[in-house]
Amino acid sequence: MTHTRRPLLAIALALPLALAACSGGQAGEEAYAPQPDTLQIYSAQHIEVTKAVAAEFTEETGIPTQVRDGQDSSMGHMIVKEGSSSPADVFLTENSPAMTLVEREGLLAPVDATALDQVRDGLAPSSRLWAPIAARSTVLVYNKDLISEQDLPSSMMELADPKWSGKWGAAPGGADFQAIAAGMLAERGESETRAWLQALADNAEVYQNNIATMKAVNAGEVPVGIMYHYYWYRDQAGDRQGSANTALHYFGGEDPGAFVSLSAGGVLASSDMPEEAQRFLEYATGPKGQRALVDSGSMEYAVGTGTNSDPALPSLEELEAPAVEVSSLNSDQVIALMTDVGIL
């Protein structure tokens, strides 16, 4: 079967995307060109995870894939700007707000029930326009030499108290933190979220990313920091140079600090390979795709029924995450709030 690939519009968008293909080639944005009769996967997920799943999918089905690597927000906005002319067949994100950005523009096709039925209860969006493919938990990393376990906050909201001034860190410029704030916004509303973000702007140390936050806590720059769980587990499984002095605190109790973010997978309504795209999501959420996720060493949570995550992790059920309608998460509104308070 011969498919017609849509014209590439990305060159004119000037978005900061790094590009990679399953063939292993790296290219500048200007050099990117969709290969004919090849499933186009726009991915903001960890590239090693996407490549592992895509390679096994191709081996299983014979359907060739090409992966375009990028970041959540920029790639979501790229797809929106490309609209129905986008070369993308599948969009994978690290965090679901980038997917809901595309969802709100009406650019997604409904996900086949076969894929959604493979996902654990309560994780799929009510819209059924995308499927979870992995999960990551919000945690508080703390320096064991600087603060005792009994002195840790019981809620992430407590960090807004002036007594925590200069004692905590975060990386608000990243999509991970913005997903956490989007969960807070959905659950606690704009007023409370704005106040918490203002406290961050006034009193917290700002770092470039989650790894920098963890290393700063490990080095004693601040006693505690907000980040996702898997950075710590990956470092602990390695040389522990970035986490040797630290431990993780899980807030639990449906606190905003127990937010569980979902990596998402969606099929573009404009895809000219819709059946193959749906098969890819079915594979990614199924036992083999979920096992590829776990075996990749990303230390993210598997979300498929019957697939266990890495045994070092507490179970998803133990996290006691807040109940948030994932289709309602709005990263653009969070970015506007963060801009208002002077973080961005």
Image: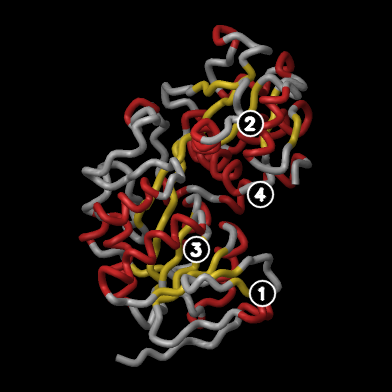
Q: Which callout, 4 or 1, points to the residue nearer the camera?
A: 1
Per the image, the residue denoted by label 4 is 335
- Between label 3 and label 1, give the one nearer the viewer: 1
Q: Amino acid at mark 1?
A: Gly
Look at 55% across and 39% down and name the residue there.
180
Which sits earlier in the primary sequence, circle 2 or circle 4?
2
Label 3 sits on residue: 43
**Residue appearing at x 34%, y 44% in the figure:** 302
Q: Which residue is mark 1?
A: 28
| Element carrying mark 1 | loop
Quarter of the image for the N terminus: give it: bottom left
Give the x, y percent position of residue 158.
61, 19
Specify few, some or many for label 4: CA neighbours under 10 Å numbering under 14, 14-19, or 20 or more: some
Q: Residue furthest front?
A: 239
Left/right of residue 86 with respect to residue 303 in the rendered view: right
Identify which residue, 154 or 161, lies in the foreground: 154
Question: SS of the residue at dot 4?
Answer: helix
> Which residue in the protein does label 2 denote?
241
Q: Residues within 10 Å of mark 2 (few under 14, many from 20)?
A: few
Q: CA distance from mark 3 to mark 1?
A: 16 Å
Secondary structure at badge 3 equals strand
